[in-house]
Amino acid sequence: MSQFGKTLSKKMRTLKTNQISKPIVSPWGVHILRKEKMTDKDILNLIKKQYINELHTKIFKELRKTCDVKVLQ
């Protein structure tokens, strides 16, 4: 994990539920964190979404290798 990721993670651990952090400045901009309460169901839904996104990415990469796919903008 990058130092920036460690800094954010450390800051999140100090916040109470629904508390909003003071602005955190990084090379990528200014960040404001808010800690939300998550249920087991919320966490499971996030994991499912991440898995589906990763699966879609893998499928599209394979399709691009085997098919004549053109991305139009």
Image (tube, rainbow, N blue to C red):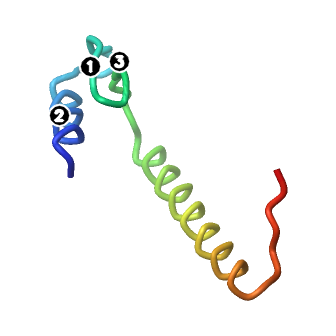
41 with respect to 27 (left or right) = right
Q: Position of residue 20 (x, y in %)?
A: 32, 14
Q: Nearer the viewer, mark 2 or mark 3?
A: 2
Give whichever of discs 2 and 3 has the lower sequence position: 2
Callout 1 amino acid = Ile
How far apart, in angstroms, are the residues tagged by discs 3 and 1?
17 Å
Callout 3 amino acid = Asn
46 with respect to 27 (left or right) = right
Give whichever of discs 2 and 1 has the lower sequence position: 2
> Where on the picture, by quarter, is residue 19?
top left
Work out whether 11 lies above or below 45: above
How far apart, in angstroms, are the residues tagged by discs 2 and 3?
19 Å
Q: Which residue is mark 2?
A: 7
Label 2 close to label 1 by CB (< 8 Å): yes
The residue tagged with tag 1: helix, strand or loop?
Answer: strand
Give the residue drawn at x 36%, y 30%: 28
Q: Which residue is mark 3?
A: 18
Camera-side residue: 73 or 58? 73
How far apart, in angstroms, are the residues tagged by discs 2 and 1?
9 Å
Label 2 close to label 3 by CB (< 8 Å): no
Callout 2 amino acid = Thr
Q: Position of residue 73 (x, y in %)?
A: 82, 50
Give whichever of discs 3 and 1 has the lower sequence position: 3
Q: Nearer the viewer, mark 3 or mark 1?
A: 1
Any mark on residue 24, and which?
1
The residue tagged with tag 2: helix, strand or loop?
Answer: helix
